Image (cartoon, helix red, strand yellow):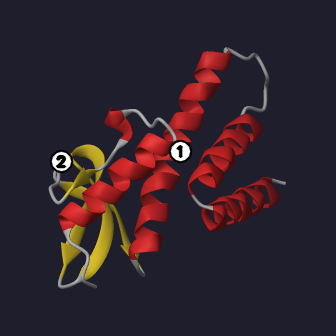
Amino acid sequence: MAESIWQIKELVTKLARQIDAPIEFLPAIGRSPYDAEPHVEIRNGELFYVVVERGKEIRRDKATNLDDLLYLIFETITFDMACRYLILLRTETMDQMPIIFSKQTELMGMLNEEWEIRVQKKHDEIIHRAG
């Protein structure tokens, strides 16, 4: 993979602007903040989406390509945005996941139709398992 950290950072910033993502929701690119914030790494030409908390790695997803990495990044960002949206609604609804899932799907669709379909499929699987 020929992607550089700087190219990834530019793409993330560009896509984040499309959905007005708060800057604090964006991952660190190329460095680990070590405080449970996601970050992106390139190691031996491979792309990773990583979360480290208190020096311990709690998540490491290997992306198959740049599109997959961007999906992983924006899956997290849009979920956080959907949760913030729910808080702003101040709803008393007992089942709040449909609201979060709907908003996240909408945001992912604003970025990429394939990501919208992918995240919707993930939501459907979660709902089916919770059954």
Q: Quadrant of residue 59?
A: bottom left
The residue wearing badge 2 is 34
Image coordinates for residue 14, horizontal then vertical, percent: 38, 50
Would residue 58 appear left or right of 4 to someone viewing this image? right
Q: Amino acid at mark 2?
A: Tyr
Viewer-side residue, 75 vs 96: 75
Q: Circle 2 sits in a helix, a strand or a loop, which is it? A: loop
Instruction: Tell me if residue 69 comes above or below residue 34 in the rendering.
Output: below
Whole-percent x, y for residue 31 in the image: 14, 56
Q: Which residue sits at x=70%, y=64%?
A: 117
**Foreground residue, 103 or 92?**
103
- Gap in angstroms between the C-alphas marked 2 and 1: 22 Å
Report the front residue among 81 and 59.
81
Residue 63 drawn at (x, y percent)? 40, 75
Give the residue at mark 1: 78
Quadrant where the N terminus sits is bottom left
Q: Nearer the viewer, mark 2 or mark 1?
A: 1
Specify the farthest residue to the right. Answer: 131
Residue under the image location 35 percent in, 58 percent down: 11
